Amino acid sequence: MFALKCRIGCLCAVMATTFALQGCENSSNGAEQKVEIKAAPKITNDATVYAQKAWDLINQVDPMLYQNQKDQIQKMVREPVRQLTLDWRINVKMTDSVTEGKYALCRKALTSIDSWARAIVEDEGQLELRQSTYEADKAKCKGAISNPELGNTKAYTKIF
């Protein structure tokens, strides 16, 4: 009697598993979805790369600010500037073997261009002050890019 109940129980378990697994099967009625695998972005802690990206971005977007194109500033200026600043702050730390040195001036130029862009969009006062601050920071960044020997500080490995 026990053997009969055991066989019926096993048979029910096998049938339930079969039905459950059929529900998990991909249907062939719809188009198959292809998963696209993308390569991970190359991450670097070298401030030289970020300073060059900042310089390129600054030169690309500052005409929009000078032309006062409010409709494009949020998407075309502020978002890329903030993303680059965020990536820079995450990936280049003072504890890394290569630190920012004079290239920090380019990060400061990114901050001041964002401040100027925000002032334009939100119709804040002090536009001239923010613009002049940005132009001074941009000139300092240009100096750091032009003189790469002043850029990254050397790693100090002789601690003791």
Image: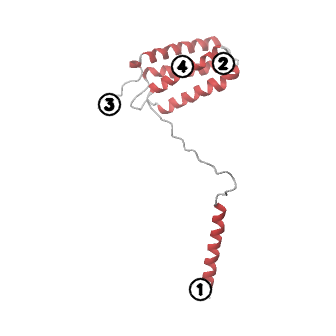
At x 65% / y 26%, what residue is drawn? 75
Residue 3: which numbered mark, if any?
A: 1
Q: Nearer the viewer, residue 138 or 71?
A: 71
4 or 1: tag closer to the N-terminus: 1
| Residue assigned mark 3 | 157
From the top left corner, tell me how far across and down residue 44 is, in percent.
Answer: 45, 32
Q: Nearer the viewer, residue 91 or 145?
A: 145
From the top left corner, tell me how far across and down residue 137 is, in percent.
Answer: 53, 15
- Contact between marks 1 and 3 (CB within 8 A): the answer is no
| Residue assigned mark 2 | 119
Q: Is residue 58 above or below residue 44?
A: above
Find the distance from the CA under tag 2 to the CA under tag 1. 83 Å
4 or 3: tag closer to the N-terminus: 4
- Give the class, few, some or many, for how many residues have Cα within 10 Å of label 1's Cα (few <14, many ≥20): few
> Closer to the camera: disc 4 or disc 3?
4
Could you tell me how many numbered marks the image carries?
4
4 or 2: tag closer to the N-terminus: 4
Helix, strand or loop status at disc 3? loop
Find the distance from the CA under tag 4 to the CA under tag 1. 81 Å
- Is 23 on the left-hand or right-hand side of 132? right
Find the distance from the CA under tag 4 to the CA under tag 2. 15 Å
| Residue assigned mark 4 | 109
